[in-house]
Image (tube, grey):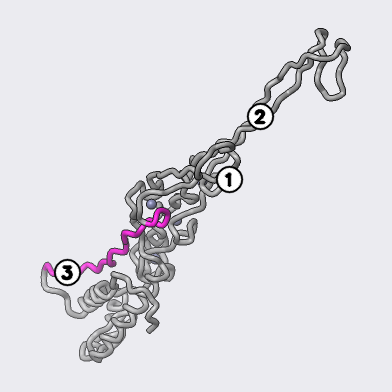
Amino acid sequence: MNLSIAILAVSFLPFFEARNQVANFVIDPPPEGKSVKPALPNLTVTETCPACDGKGELVLEEPDYGQAKGRLGPAKKTRKKCPLCAGRGKMQAFMNPSELALQVASDRAAFAAEHQGRGEIAVGEAFVPNEKYDSLDKERLKLVEAAFGHPCKKCNWTGLEPCRKCSGSGLVKCSNSDCKGGWAVVKTTTESSVRKSGSSSNGIRSNNGGLRSRSGSRSTVRKETKINVSPCPVCGGAKQTVCPDCGGRRAHPCSKCNGLGIKTKGSL
Ligand SMILES: [Zn+2]
Ligand SMILES: [Zn+2]
Ligand SMILES: [Zn+2]
Ligand SMILES: [Zn+2]
């Protein structure tokens, strides 16, 4: 086995064993009041916020768009509560769907190996003891198979599908088209007319667009450009925002099986 595969703190083995117990109850019903409810393992994890690296705050360094002309000293640094994790440094998410797929495959293989090792016979996805198997007719075998169930084709037992909007990352690029690396750069140009006194010819338009008044003074337009740089109002300087579809959780309960992980009647 490849050692670079991350070992997740989750196992599907109890889930498979519980399903197998339920399947075997078709042959030997459980004692009164003793039922088994197969439940998927908890697939949520608390992860370090990728935007602030778990620090809970962003240190924003104001880029130079010429707004600080004449200002001395280093670029302005601003500390800001991380807008993606609200300062917690951590985010709740579903386990990485591709790592989860590997985990399911390896747990399923371990489950099968364990039961085959005991000499049990596969009935669909379930395993029944060898000596029981011979006593079962076709119809009973079908019931055993159905009681275990088959994996949902879309999510393969996990009950999750990766979020398509963010490709499973939980984050999306800032939606503000004017966002420049987390900053809003606003240029404002103010025009002011300035009067100059001058020449002698009255009421004649000059070549350079200024208007000569009767009094002989001339007005010209002076343009002044101011640049204002502030953290982007949408992403708050983080350049990205929490995915609006999955809320940063990277995945959704599978739409085909309603998050159950098994093939349901509607999806057959
Ligand atoms: Zn954060
Ligand atoms: Zn599914
Ligand atoms: Zn932005
Ligand atoms: Zn998403």
The chief SS type of the magenta part is loop
Q: Is 222 located above or below residue 251 in the figure?
A: above
Can I make out residue 134 in this image? no
For disc 1, the marked residue is 177
Q: Is 77 located above or below residue 119 in the figure?
A: above
Q: Earlier in the sequence, mark 2 or mark 3?
A: 3
Q: Earlier in the sequence, mark 3 or mark 1?
A: 3
Can I make out residue 112 in this image? yes
Relative to the observer, which residue lies in front, 204 or 239? 204
Give the alpha-carbon distance from disc 2 to disc 3, as whole Å.
Answer: 79 Å
Q: Residue 149, percent across and down?
A: 32, 73
Q: Residue at x 24, y 69 (%)?
A: 38
For disc 3, the marked residue is 35
For disc 2, the marked residue is 224
Give the alpha-carbon distance from disc 2 to disc 1, as whole Å.
Answer: 25 Å
Residue stretch rendered in magenta on the structure? 33-53
Relative to the observer, which residue lies in front, 230 or 259? 230
Q: Residue 9, percent across and down?
A: 29, 70
- Ligand 2, by image quadrant, is bottom left
Residue 35 among those drawn in magenta:
yes
Q: Which residue of the protein is positioned furthest toward the front in this rendering?
A: 72
Q: Is 67 located above or below residue 43 in the figure?
A: above
Kind of residue indicated by mark 3: Ser
Q: Residue 160, percent across and down?
A: 38, 64
